[in-house]
Amino acid sequence: MSPSPASAAAMPLAAEPDDTEVEADEGVKGIEGLVVGSYCHDVLLRGDRVVGETLGGAAAFVSNVLDAASPADATLSVVSKVGPDFAYATAPAPARHRPVVCASSPTTSFHARFSSDGGEATAHAPDRQLRRVHACDPIYPSDLPDRRFAYGLAVGVAGEVLPETLDRMIRLCRAVLVDAQALIRAFDDGGAVRHVALEATPYARLLPRVAFLKASSEEAPFVGVEVARRRCCVIVTEGRDGCRLYWDGGEARVAPFPAVQVDPTGAGDSFLAGFASGLLWGLSAMDAALLGNFFGAAAVSQVGVPTFNPKMLQAVKQILDEKAIKRPCTRLNGNMFTFQRSNMHDVLHTSLQEVARLICEQKQASCPATDNGASSPATDNGDIRSLGDVNPLICLSQDAYKIIT
Ligand SMILES: Nc1ncnc2c1ncn2[C@@H]1O[C@H](COP(=O)(O)OP(=O)(O)OP(=O)(O)O)[C@@H](O)[C@H]1O
Ligand SMILES: O[C@H]1[C@H](O)[C@@H](O)[C@H](O)[C@@H](O)[C@H]1O
């Protein structure tokens, strides 16, 4: 769908709270981002069989993409908590952004159970059953650094970003992007992940001061897109179909990129970070969503937190350098966002698509058909049929996973 005429409208940054602690520009030096959410242990199961153990947590996926794709002058602080049992301290993302180790609680841990018949996810049905097995301590407002940031990402996975912590983030950051999973997850007695209506949570009153709220299509009905879009821009990710942006007065679809999917975990996290990076490069929200889709597609092609090929990153940055239309007013660290689809949108999509195609081709070449006769992971089958069948040396990210054969 093409954007409505209202798409050219600009949206003011998050309004300052009543008892304003921070003047809009006061104390913001350079482009420093603040990511809040805990790293976790992910155990991947197919039926009852454990097929992999990986580093997880939206903060791990998000910082991985921001570190890789942001402009050179952008920096990042991550506030994350883990227990003394944390198994991935030397993996790249936690090594770069060290978590707080809590002596008295274990690392947050999830079991992600994919159906053993490889059944596909549908628009509002989950592709996996998630169960929280352990929960680390929440992140309190006092855990946040006492300085100003150009932008913030609230990316909790297990309810660790408390309402008062999000409120504090909004006061410290000029623009805050929120993953709905940080706000609407509830856990039953067995730890199974459920969703509650955002409107019924204490987070709802904070929405008018949030810049962007991202939800998966499964989460969207709980977010209440029609109400939420009047308060902030809502982005609904639609798996292999890309995403849709909804704002007060318009909506638009942004096209996806090809991917060889082996594990959907972290696609939404990587999308959000790619989107934020796009804003940092000076893209409009619509154009930045292309970068979100690009990194979402890159995430599903590896198990766990992906390792990006340096040549791929170089190609993406070169494209952004050449094609990004740099309007200071659309920068994340500027004053306004616009939703305008730039006249470079299609060119940007085509250029990034070429890079995405190359990654797929290289992946197809490096992941041969399995000796059990199963199809190679080269088929984008939208599920994890190939998880556990792929060659871990080729397809998994170093230090951040353990594959069980
Ligand atoms: N199979 C795929 N092919 C291409 N792109 C994909 C695919 N799956 C996901 N993506 C990209 O990643 C984005 C996020 O995916 P999705 O909507 O599945 O998020 P999610 O359900 O929040 O994921 P998760 O909870 O696993 O992090 C999509 O908008 C799309 O751009
Ligand atoms: O590592 C994953 C990832 O961060 C997902 O986005 C989240 O939904 C899961 O709970 C978590 O285990």
Image (cartoon, rainbow, N blue to C red):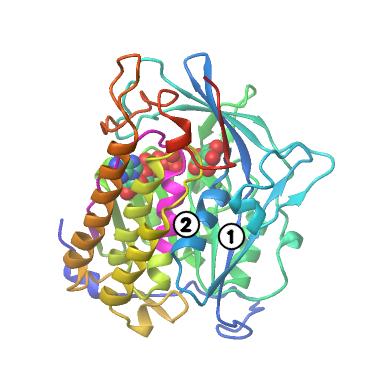
Q: Is residue 323 left or right of residue 24?
A: left
Determine which residue is flagged by label 2.
65
Dot 1 surroundings within 10 Å: few (below 14), some, or many (20 or more)?
Answer: many
Q: Is residue 292 left or right of residue 352?
A: right
Position of residue 202 measured from the top left corner of the image (x, y, whole percent): 59, 51
Determine which residue is flagged by label 1.
35
Residue 97 is one of the magenta-drawn residues = no
Region rendered in magenta: 251-276
Amino acid of disc 1: Val
Q: Is residue 250 left or right of residue 223?
A: left
Which quarter of the rendered picture does the N terminus lie within? bottom left
Disc 1 within 8 angstroms of ligand 2 (CB) = no
For ligand 1, give the image quadrant.
top left
Position of residue 222 measured from the top left corner of the image (x, y, whole percent): 43, 41
- Asked whether 72 or 230 is in front, the reply is 72
Query: Image point 70% across, 55% down: which residue?
Result: 98
Q: Is residue 137 above or below residue 133?
A: below
Residue 260 is one of the magenta-drawn residues = yes
Query: Image point 41% across, 19% down: which residue?
Result: 115
Q: Is residue 237 visible?
A: no
Q: Is residue 330 above or below residue 90?
A: below
- Asked whether 363 or 139 is in front, the reply is 363
Amino acid of disc 2: Val
Position of residue 34 measured from the top left corner of the image (x, y, whole percent): 59, 65
